[in-house]
C-alpha cells in the first residue's frame, strides 16, 4: 500500500502536469475559480510620473538631480538587483519554483518591495541633491553680496582718507573705515570657504568635476524662486502637509516685508554717503547705514533660500504621497508572477 507521502507527491505531480503548458505555469486559482491575488509584479509597481524636479522651474536643478541619480553607485546596485530579479521572475523555472513554494508555504522574493525601496531611495537622493544645490546657491549669493559691499567699503575708506588729508575729518573716520573693511574681509574669507565646500559636496554627489559645476553655477542666477506644487496635490486634512504649507506662507510673508526694509536701508545708506561726501554728515552715520543695508540684503537672501528649501520639501512630500496612492494593492509577492505571467482562464 502506498504511503500518504507518495500519494501526495503523485497528486502534486498530476496537478503540475495539468496546470503547466509549453509557455509556462498558469497562475494558481483561488477557491471559486477567481485568480489568486498575489500575481503581478514588475514595471507596474513603479508608475511612470513626471519627476517633480523638472516642474519647479529651474533647469539646472533638474540637470543636476538627473546626473546624481545616474551616477549614484548604490542606486545602480539596487536597480540592477531589481532588474535581475524581475528577469528571473519571467523564466518558466522561476515561476514554477515560486508556485511550488507558495503551495508549500515557503517565503518568496517580493519584487514590489524591491521596486518600492529603489523608488524611495531615488526620492531621498533627489531631495538631498536639491537641498545641497540650494545651499550652494545661498553661499554663492552671500559671497557676491559681501564682495559688492567690500568694494563699496573700500570706496568709503578712500573718501575718509581724502577728507582727513584735507583736514576736513578726524582720524576716527579712517579708523571706522578700516574696521568696516577688516570685518567684511574676514566674512568674505569665510564665505569663500563655505562656497568651496558646497561646490565640492554637490560635485561629488552629481558625479561631475568641481570645475564643471563651477562653470554651471557661475551664471549670476542667485537663489532660485521655485514653483510650488499645484493646488490640490496634497492630501486633504494632512497635518504635516498643512504645517509645510503654513511654513511656506510665513516665509513668503517675511520676504515681502523684507523687501521694504531693504529698500529703506539702501536709501538711507545712499543718503548717508552723499551727505558725507558733501561734508554735511559724519562717517558714523555712513557706517551704521551701510551695515544695516548689508544685513537687510543678507536677510533677503536667507529668506529666499528658506522659501526654496520649503518648496523642495513640499514637492518631496507630494511625491511620496503620490507614490503611496499609485502603489498597486498586494503587488509583487513572488518573482514567479511577473508582468508576463499567464492570464487566469475562467472556466
Image (cartoon, helix red, strand yellow):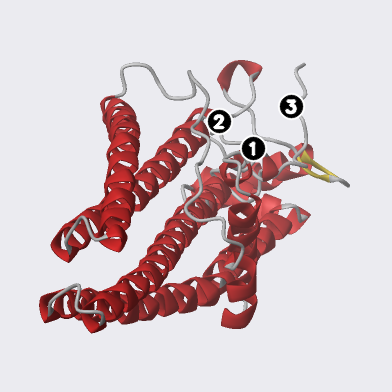
10 Å crowding of disc 1: few (<14), some (14-19), many (20+): few
Q: Position of residue 102 (x, y in %)?
A: 54, 45
In this figure, which residue is indicated by the disc labeled 3?
344
Q: What separation in Å lies between label 1 and label 2 (alpha carbons)? A: 7 Å
In this figure, which residue is indicated by the disc labeled 2?
326
Residue furthest to the right in view is 22
Q: Position of residue 212 (x, y in %)?
A: 65, 77
Q: Is residue 111 above or below residue 279?
A: above
Which badge, 1 or 2, comes first in the chain's sequence? Answer: 1
Task: Find out whether the residues at labels 1 and 2 contact each other: C-beta distance under 8 Å.
Answer: yes
* Picture quadrant where residue 42 is located: top right
Q: Position of residue 235 (x, y in %)?
A: 40, 21
Q: What separation in Å lies between label 3 and label 1 (alpha carbons)? A: 24 Å
Which badge, 3 or 1, comes first in the chain's sequence? Answer: 1
Q: Nearer the viewer, residue 140 or 144?
A: 144
Q: Is residue 2 visible?
A: no
Which badge, 2 or 3, comes first in the chain's sequence? Answer: 2
Q: Is residue 88 visible?
A: yes
Q: Is residue 138 left or right of residue 233?
A: left
Residue at 73 percent across and 41 percent down: it is: 339
10 Å crowding of disc 3: few (<14), some (14-19), many (20+): some
User: For the image shown, how many numbered marks are present on the structure?
Assistant: 3
Select label 2 or label 3 by which is in front.
2
Q: Secondary structure at mark 2?
A: helix
In this figure, which residue is indicated by the disc labeled 1?
47
Residue at 17 percent across and 73 percent down: it is: 169
10 Å crowding of disc 2: few (<14), some (14-19), many (20+): some
Q: Nearer the viewer, residue 125 or 271?
A: 271
Amino acid at each position: 500500500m502506498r504511503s500518504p507521502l507518495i500519494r501526495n507527491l503523485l497528486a502534486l505531480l498530476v496537478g503540475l502536469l495539468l496546470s503547466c503548458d509549453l509557455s509556462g505555469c498558469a497562475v494558481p486559482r483561488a477557491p471559486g475559480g477567481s485568480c489568486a491575488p498575489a500575481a503581478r509584479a514588475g514595471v507596474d509597481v513603479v508608475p511612470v510620473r513626471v519627476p517633480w524636479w523638472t516642474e519647479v522651474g529651474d533647469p539646472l536643478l533638474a540637470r543636476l538631480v538627473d546626473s546624481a541619480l545616474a551616477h549614484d553607485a548604490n542606486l545602480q546596485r539596487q536597480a540592477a538587483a531589481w532588474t535581475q530579479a524581475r528577469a528571473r521572475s519571467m523564466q518558466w523555472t522561476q515561476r514554477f519554483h515560486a508556485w511550488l513554494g507558495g503551495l508549500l508555504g515557503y517565503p518568496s522574493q517580493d519584487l514590489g518591495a524591491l521596486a518600492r525601496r529603489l523608488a524611495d531611495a531615488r526620492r531621498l537622493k533627489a531631495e538631498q541633491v536639491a537641498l545641497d544645490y540650494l545651499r550652494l546657491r545661498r553661499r554663492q549669493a552671500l559671497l557676491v553680496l559681501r564682495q559688492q559691499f567690500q568694494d563699496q567699503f573700500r570706496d568709503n575708506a578712500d573718501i575718509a582718507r581724502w577728507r582727513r588729508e584735507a583736514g576736513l575729518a578726524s582720524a576716527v573716520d579712517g579708523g571706522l573705515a578700516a574696521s568696516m573693511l577688516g570685518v567684511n574681509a574676514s566674512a568674505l574669507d569665510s564665505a569663500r570657504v563655505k562656497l568651496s565646500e558646497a561646490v565640492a559636496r554637490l560635485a561629488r554627489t552629481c558625479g561631475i568635476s568641481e570645475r564643471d559645476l563651477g562653470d554651471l553655477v557661475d551664471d549670476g542666477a542667485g537663489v532660485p524662486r521655485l514653483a510650488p506644487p499645484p493646488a490640490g496635490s496634497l492630501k486633504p486634512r494632512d497635518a504635516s502637509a498643512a504645517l509645510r504649507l503654513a511654513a511656506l506662507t510665513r516665509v513668503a510673508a517675511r520676504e515681502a516685508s523684507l523687501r521694504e526694509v531693504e529698500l529703506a536701508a539702501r536709501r538711507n545708506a545712499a543718503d548717508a554717503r552723499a551727505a558725507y561726501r558733501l561734508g554735511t554728515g559724519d562717517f558714523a552715520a555712513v557706517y551704521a547705514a551701510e551695515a544695516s543695508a548689508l544685513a537687510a540684503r543678507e536677510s533677503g537672501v536667507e529668506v529666499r533660500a528658506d522659501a526654496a528649501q520649503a518648496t523642495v520639501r513640499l514637492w518631496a512630500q507630494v511625491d511620496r504621497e503620490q507614490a503611496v496612492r499609485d502603489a498597486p494593492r498586494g503587488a509583487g509577492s513572488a518573482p514567479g508572477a511577473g508582468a508576463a505571467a499567464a492570464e487566469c482562464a475562467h472556466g
